Amino acid sequence: MKVPESLTKMIPMTGIKHYTTTTKGIGGQIKRRISDFIVRETTPEGRHLSNEVFGEWEPPREQKLEVPWQPEGTEYLHVTMEKFNLDTNEALRRVSRALYVSPKRIGYAGMKDRRAITVQRISIWNPDAQRLAAFRSRYVSLREPEWRQGRIEIGDLKGNGFEVTVRGIEMGEEELRRTIGECFSEMTTHGVANYFGEQRFGGAREITHRVGKEFIKGNLEGAVMLYLTGESKSEEQEIADARKSLAENKDFARALREFPAKFRYERSILHHLSVHPRDFVGAFQKLPKHLTYLFTHAYQSYIFNEIINARIETGIGLGPCEGDILEDGEATAALPGFDSALAEGRPGEAERSVLEKEGVKPEDFRVKSFMELSCSGGRKKIVLRPHEPRLIGISADECNEGKIKAKIGFWLEKGNYATTILRELHKLPYTQEKNP
């Protein structure tokens, strides 16, 4: 799939580099309001969840939860959790605190966006029915309880439906309608480069995969220090100064005093290092277990993105060719690990060239000094096609006088990113794609 040079944009550090549709970008902005981005999980059985509490309506609709009788042999209560402008971990913490239980008792299928309204199923092991029925939160709602035998684990979903409002568009309505239709047609016919979205790489600091690389290279101290000291231009001055000070003097006790209280993960690491200044593995293990996995997996994702770039830039393209390892007839690329199977032929050359450029080998993903961070590897399709893409409506944008907004919808299978679809639609430079 050859891409015109005019449609190629470089996004620093995350590997998201090329556009694979040729339509004109519509511009605009996403997530101006929380209700502009709605994510609805689809269960493994194919049930599409709906948002019923939070939305464009005000105030939130009241939902009561009545815990049903518990059948013999069931231990897990599955409920629908709808949240507003919270990340998944924070929402689950609020639920666990209200129930006086460990967050480990709660299972979920996947992380959902923070600046959004999202709906997903979670499971709670033998919750106190009275406390659960009394749960109230301004930003989290629980409903539709059902007793089940099993826990909801990561990956226990079919996909996610998205309803997104793009604001601040300067096109005329007729041109906008035509452009969206043409872009969606390209996406469904040819697909787009299936990049891992920027949220995979740690948000504003874009640091998660860089920390993961240091672990893969065996540089434990470098990994932990990068996590603690890596700066972002968008961070508040107080934390920026604290990170810079720590990078210069490596005084962990002083950093513990200087890091603001809300940076609890960094402070947990610093507390350990202030007592055990050379125990970098023990310090990083102070993070919740599910978070430690993110770093080396984010580095896998970065390499996957770079393999896509290598295929495009060397003319291999994204379509199946000799040497590819296929899934459902589609070409895949490596998520490298110590058990990785690399492609053959030109696709294999592209994969090996990226690993060589990074200075890593598949066997390096067995992190002997910190085995919890090891990655066995896998493969993923390099082309993404949205299901049921549709233009829901176009109207005046009440947030931007003289401009219009478009509401669109689509559905993606699990493990794929809505931002990958949206960036192809609005085609903005990196600095404009970032949202507040």
Image (tube, rainbow, N blue to C red):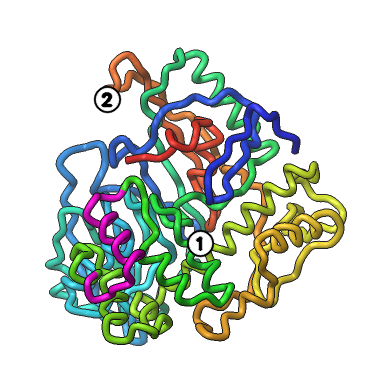
Residue occupied by mark 2: 399
Magenta span contains residue 251: yes
Please determine whether, in this image, residue 103 is positioned above or below residue 408: below
Identify the residue at image location x=39%, y=77%.
284
Separation of marks 2 and 1 at Cα, in angstroms: 37 Å
Q: Position of residue 203 (x, y in %)?
A: 40, 52
The image position of residue 200, as x and y in percent, is: 48, 56
The answer to whether residue 377 shows anywhere in this view is yes
Vertical placement of residue 281 versus 354, above or below = below
Relative to 220, 187 lies left or right: right
Q: Quadrant of residue 376?
A: bottom right
Tag 1 residue: 210
Q: In this rendering, which labeled residue sits more in front, label 2 or label 1?
A: 1
Q: Is residue 219 magenta?
A: no
- The part of the image, by quadrant, that contains residue 434 is top left
Name which residue lies at 67% across and 65% down: 359
Where is residue 176 shown, x and y percent of the image?
A: 49, 19
Badge 2: residue crowd in 10 Å (few <14, some 14–19, many ≥20): few
Task: Give the main secondary structure of the magenta stretch.
Answer: helix
Label 2–label 1 contact, CB within 8 A: no
Q: Amino acid at mark 2?
A: Cys
Please, what is the three-letter code of the amino acid marked with disc 1?
A: Arg
